[in-house]
Image (tube, rainbow, N blue to C red):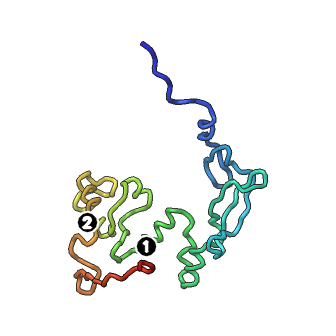
C-alpha cells in the first residue's frame, strides 16, 4: 500500500513565518520578522487628539504599532471634556473596560450587571442582553444552583434565546412601544 503525500511541511519559508517568538515590549508572541529591538512613543495622526502609539522598531525603522495604554488617548480626552474623565482612569484592560460598562448599564434597558466578567461571556459563547443581576439571581434560584457555570443546559439555552423587549415591556413612561414614521427623503445627488 502506498503512502499518501504529506500535506504538512515542517520547514520552508511559509512555515518559518508562522513560528512565533517572544515579542518583547508588551507584544506577546510575534513572527520572527516582527520582533522589535526598541520602541518609541509617537502621537497618532489619525484624529490628532494626542492618543499615544508605541512604534516597534527594528534597524531604526518602525515595523509594528500598538496602542500605548499609559499615554493620553482620544476617549480619555473626550470624556474629560464631558466631565466624566474619571471613568477612564481604570480603563486599561478588556476586563476593566467590561466592569466599567457593566456598572454604567445598571438599571438601563441593556443592563448587564448579571454577567460576572468578560471571560464568562467568552465561555458562554455570548449572552443575550439585558442580563441584570436580578435576572441572574432568579435563574440561579429557580435552578437551585449557586453559580452561572452550574446552570443546567436547558436554562443556559433559555438565557441565550431571550430577546430584548420579548416580554412586551419597553423603556417608555407607560411601558408601551413607540413606532415612529418619517417620510422618505431623497438622497442628495440622485437627480
What number is the disc on residue 35?
none
The percent coordinates of residue 51 (x first, y second) are 64, 71
Depth check, mark 1 against mark 2: the one in front is 1
**Picture quarter with the C terminus:** bottom left
Left or right side of 17 for 189:
left
Looking at the picture, tell me which residue is in the foreground, 57 or 93: 57
What residue is pinned by disc 1?
Answer: 103
Q: Residue at x 32, y 81 (%)?
A: 184
The residue at the point 29 percent across, 59 percent down is 160
Q: Secondary structure at mark 1?
A: helix
Q: Residue at x 72, y 56 (%)?
A: 62
Which of the marked residues, 1 or 2, is nearer the chain's N terminus? 1
Label 1 CA crowd tier, 10 Å (few <14, some 14–19, many 20+): few
Q: Nearer the viewer, residue 152 or 174?
A: 174
When the figure is inspected, residue 191 is found, relative to residue 6, above or below; the finding is below
Q: Which residue is mark 2?
A: 138
Q: Is disc 2 placed on a helix, strand or loop? A: helix
Q: CA distance from mark 1 to mark 2?
A: 20 Å
Q: Position of residue 182 (x, y in %)?
A: 31, 84
Q: Quadrant of residue 121?
A: bottom left
Q: Where residue 61 sits in the image (x, y, percent)? A: 75, 55
Q: Residue at x 35, y 66 (%)?
A: 114
Hey, which quadrant is residue 142 in on the image?
Answer: bottom left
Amino acid at each position: 500500500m502506498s503512502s499518501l503525500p504529506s500535506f504538512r511541511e515542517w520547514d520552508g519559508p511559509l512555515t518559518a513565518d508562522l513560528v512565533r517568538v517572544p515579542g518583547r515590549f508588551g507584544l506577546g508572541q510575534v513572527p520572527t520578522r516582527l520582533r522589535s529591538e526598541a520602541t518609541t512613543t509617537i502621537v497618532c495622526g489619525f484624529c490628532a487628539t494626542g492618543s499615544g502609539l508605541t512604534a516597534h522598531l527594528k534597524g531604526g525603522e518602525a515595523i509594528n504599532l500598538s496602542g500605548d495604554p499609559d499615554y493620553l488617548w482620544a476617549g480619555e480626552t473626550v470624556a474629560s471634556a464631558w466631565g466624566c474623565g474619571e471613568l477612564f482612569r481604570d480603563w486599561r484592560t478588556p476586563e476593566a473596560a467590561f466592569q466599567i460598562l457593566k456598572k454604567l448599564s445598571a438599571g438601563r434597558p441593556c443592563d448587564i450587571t448579571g454577567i460576572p466578567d468578560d471571560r464568562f461571556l467568552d465561555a458562554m459563547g455570548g449572552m443575550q442582553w439585558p442580563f441584570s443581576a436580578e435576572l441572574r439571581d432568579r435563574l440561579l434560584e429557580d435552578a437551585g444552583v449557586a453559580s452561572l457555570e452550574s446552570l443546567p443546559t436547558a436554562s443556559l439555552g433559555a438565557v441565550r434565546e431571550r430577546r430584548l423587549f420579548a416580554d412586551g415591556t419597553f423603556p417608555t413612561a407607560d411601558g408601551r412601544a413607540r413606532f415612529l414614521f418619517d417620510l422618505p427623503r431623497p438622497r442628495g445627488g440622485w437627480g
